[in-house]
Image (tube, coloured by chain):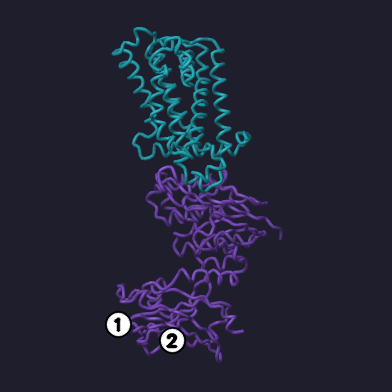
Chain colours: A cyan, B purple
Amino acid sequence: MFKIFLKKDFWEYVWVFTWRELKIKYTQTYIGVFWMIFPPFMALFIASFFFGNLLKGSAQISNYTLFAYCGMMGWYYFSYLITYTSISLIQNMDIIHKANMPVVVIPLSRALLGLFDVIIWLLIAIIVKIFMGIQFNISNIFILIAILLNFITGFSIGIWLAILSVRWRDIYQVIPYIIGLTMLITPIFYHVNMVPSSLKVFVYLNPVAGVIEIYRKHLVYSVENIYSFVPGFLMAAFLLVIGLWYFFKHEKQIAETL
Amino acid sequence: MENIITVANLTKYFKKRIEQRHFFSNKYEYVNALDNISFYVKEAESLAIIGKNGSGKSTLLKILLGVYKPTSGEIKISKTINGILDSGLGFHKDLTGYDNILILGKIIGLSVKEIKQKIDEIVEFAELQHYIYTPLKHYSNGMISRLSFSIVSLSQAEILIFDEVLAFGDIHFQQKAYQYLKKLNINGRTLLIVSHYMMGLVPLCNRFILLDKGKITADGPSYEVLPKYYDSLVNVLQFAQVKDIHNNKKVNFSLADLVIEEIKLSLCNNYIIIELKILTHRANEYDIGIVIRDLSEQNITTISMKKNNINVTDTIKSIVFQVPLEFFNIKHVLLYPYIFCLKSLEYKIFHEPFVIPLHNHDEEKNSWQRIFDNIGFVNIPVQIIVS
């Protein structure tokens, strides 16, 4: 079932489709790819000025700007993955109907396209960190693993929703609201410790919460503790296997039910 | 020659919604898109799959390409297969022609390296050298179908599949494309083509399969299959309204006014006698003739009631044509009866082109072409009359 990921031809499909998505997204814009730096700058503004100064977030949490920025970065990519991969099969209906190609390519290329955005977010985070005068540390490298975890969790849930929305279009009508609600219960602008300890379990049931914690540990606070990955990895691996299994199980029926 | 495609007892069901009563309660029934089909394709064969709309042609090709899974039955394909089921598949209107070549090429399974090597050849074949960096939204339908045909036809696969890809191309490109396909076929490639363009199919394909409601009703060379195809169409294409060819306005004549009830054929002294029995509801002056074409719908000859116009005053009238047997040196012909009402038109304008043989005058040819669009036809097996 998973042998397809070892084929060179498969990754060529992924490359061409990612490139196609990138071209479509920024075609007929004046500044093109430079739109990618717009969301992180907005996030930076919200984190530092709005939540940091006006709502006095910085009074309780050290390095609040970067703290909130990390939360928004994780959240941005996660919500991107859920929204865009879940709708990708429906948007590329004509290809699925009439060509024999591995269908996973379509959501996967969408997900990888978001990775470009995340790299820009990360670069800006590094610049901010230098600007704020925080020391760099060897554990900062692990931020890349955090991005991988973010990718896997979002993508797994995304393809699962994509398959469901092939059969029931109701799914993608609901997704924006679910994303809006989950944003509130995700520790983006606040610290997990602020949540009453009885409710903490529910916060960690949210797959993004853990990922965002890892982002912060390794980007803002430079914690040299690799074991912090373990729950995240278990969660991601579990979701990935379930998601892909469900996708491949229904792959052959997509062309007929879509 | 070995069989490179083997289809055995292939069946495909589709769920069809037949009634939507209210929000959650829909009534479904199963439709046989393909019903227990078996056939073989040999190497270097060029196979045309013909049939009416909805007869299962595209479903068959989709199953062969692996897009759909068969409900039951078996398919064995021993060579590489490639093809396109729609012109402009996967094309994005905002991207340039060049980008879309890369995308479609990848969708049908070519490697990026291969596409980049062939890109000049593709552009040249599609005759789009000046438009290749233009976004696809400024292309015409013909240009898009030219581009997608060029990409697929230059693929290296042993078996090529085309489903109405050329429907939008102009006559010039269609001829060029069919010639190219002929060349590929001679060099040993296998072709599977779905099309309604008989003029291209007859010279290209050496085998025809006629599908009707998911079943193979005929399989063989063109002169065996095409008559059956036209027979099945006779009921569909009855007489439509005939337009005044010179002013392009509708004449006072319609399907309800005049119907050909019966056609009788007989042989007499090297002449074939064609007798049309006509039913009218209104007395009118009509001019009646017959156009004879071969199976690829090319004109052989035209016969009309020469000098004397028929004034149909009875309710049923028989009209007799004599056609010399020399016109029928081929096995089958298509008979296109045509009828004109002359009431509101001058006699002279209409009468002349009937006398003059069709292929000598280009101007008449054009006006005739317009008539052909509006008339029905009857398929006549000449062999039966003669023997």
Residue A233, given in percent of the width and then of the height, sits at 56, 20
Report whether residue A160 is seen.
yes
Q: Is residue A237 left or right of residue B321?
A: right
How packed mark 1 is, by other alpha carbons closer than 10 Å (few <14, some 14-19, many 20 or more), is some
Residue type indicated by callout 2: Ile
**SS for dot 2:** strand
| Residue named by callout 2 | B319
Residue B129, given in percent of the width and then of the height, sits at 44, 53
Chain to which mark 2 belongs: B
Residue type indicated by callout 1: Lys
Residue A126, given in percent of the width and then of the height, sits at 43, 17
Q: Is residue A101 left or right of residue B134?
A: right
Which residue: 56% across, 12% down? A227
How packed mark 2 is, by other alpha carbons closer than 10 Å (few <14, some 14-19, many 20 or more), is some
| Residue named by callout 1 | B343
Report whether residue B121 is seen.
no
- Nearer to us in this view, B298 or B345: B345
